[in-house]
């Protein structure tokens, strides 16, 4: 289960709250009295308020917003290892973020890392043994491209992370209830036989089970299934979250932010 903090409409993974050295938050389309709580400064309604919104949510969970580090997400599989030289890239918006980066990992304290979405799944990896974290923007493209396994491998290579030690939170995203796909999509992913089964047919319509595919990729990468906490919220039909499928170009972005203390 994922706990909601009162009326603020921010979420945290219950399996990760017991660790004192980790702080994290999943935002939604609302925060306190604010609607359309967009945290992307380059797309969506109220994008001019994004920097204020980021600071509000960071302050609410005692995350240092000045050190917030993000990537320019482009649906590719690049993983950035955030070092001391990278801290704060993206804290001033899209223009200062790490280019072409859809996943970030770090073992630095007081260094929040963030990914954003409007339907794609957001994933948090936490290694309590080696004290390291990773965040992933798991779109269908990045998932198909192998970003899950690549991020786990990056943590292993840089922080000596054992995949079986990881504790994972899977945030909201497009669900199999609503994520309709066409024949060209199915043809594209058919080259990966392990992902193709997550196309589900109902009443002559095809749907993609993105959370199921991401979970499968995590387990294939060595994560223990019972260490994965999944937020079963479909952004397409749940109006508490932004959705490009539902709102089109006006969709803002919600986010996943994590930091080691």
Image (cartoon, grey):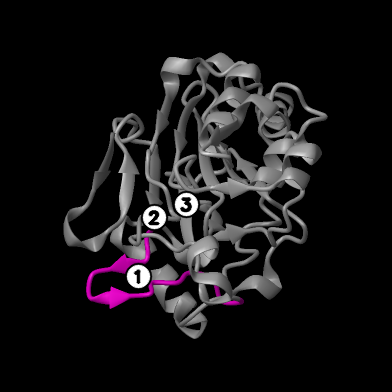
Residue 256's tag is 3
Say if 118 sits above or below 128 in the image: below
* Observer-nearest of 142 and 160: 142
Residue visible at 60% across and 29% down in the picture: 198
Q: Earlier in the sequence, mark 3 or mark 2?
A: 2
Q: Is the C-beta separation of discs 3 and 1 under 8 Å?
A: no
How far is disc 2 from disc 1 in space, using C-alphas?
26 Å
C-alpha distance separating marks 3 and 1: 14 Å
Identify the residue at horizontal 66%, vertical 30% (top origin). Answer: 155
If you read the primary sequence from the N terminus, does the residue marked by circle 3 or circle 1 appear first?
1
Pointer 2 local density, CA inside 10 Å: few below 14, some 14–19, many at least 20: some
Query: In this picture, which residue range is highlighted in magenta?
Result: 27-42
Give the mark toward the camera: 3 or 2. Answer: 2
Dot 1: element: helix
Q: Is residue 236 visible?
A: yes
Q: Is residue 143 magenta?
A: no
Secondary structure predominantly adopted by residues drawn in magenta: loop
> Residue 201 appears at what percent x and percent y?
57, 34
Residue at which label 2 appears: 237
User: Which of the labelled discs sits on residue 56, or is there none?
Assistant: 1
Is disc 3 placed on a helix, strand or loop? strand
Q: Give the CA distance from mark 3 to mark 2.
A: 20 Å
**Closer mark to the observer between disc 3 and disc 1:** 3
């Amino acid at each position: 289960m994922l706990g909601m903090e009162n009326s603020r409409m921010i979420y945290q993974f219950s399996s990760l709250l017991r660790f004192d050295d980790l702080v994290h938050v999943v935002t939604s389309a609302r925060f306190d009295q604010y609607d359309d709580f967009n945290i992307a400064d380059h797309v969506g309604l109220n994008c001019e308020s994004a920097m204020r919104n980021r600071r509000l949510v960071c302050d609410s969970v005692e995350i240092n917003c000045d050190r917030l580090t993000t990537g320019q997400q482009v649906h590719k599989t690049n993983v950035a290892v955030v070092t001391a030289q990278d801290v704060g890239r993206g804290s001033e918006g899209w223009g200062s973020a790490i280019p072409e980066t859809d996943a970030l990992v770090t073992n630095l304290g007081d260094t929040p890392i963030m990914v954003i979405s409007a339907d794609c799944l957001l994933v948090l990896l936490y290694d309590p043994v080696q004290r390291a974290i990773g965040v992933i923007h798991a779109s269908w493209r990045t998932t198909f491209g192998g970003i899950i396994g690549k991020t786990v491998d990056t943590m292993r290579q840089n922080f000596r992370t054992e995949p079986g030690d990881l504790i994972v939170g899977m945030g909201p995203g497009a669900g199999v209830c609503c994520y309709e796909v066409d024949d060209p999509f199915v043809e594209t992913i058919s080259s990966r036989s392990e992902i193709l089964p997550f196309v589900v047919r109902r009443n002559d319509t095809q749907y993609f089970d993105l959370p199921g595919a991401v979970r499968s990729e995590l387990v294939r990468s060595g994560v223990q299934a019972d260490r994965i906490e999944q937020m079963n919220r479909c952004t397409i039909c749940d109006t508490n979250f932004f959705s490009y499928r539902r709102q089109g170009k006006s969709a803002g972005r919600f986010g996943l932010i994590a930091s080691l203390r």
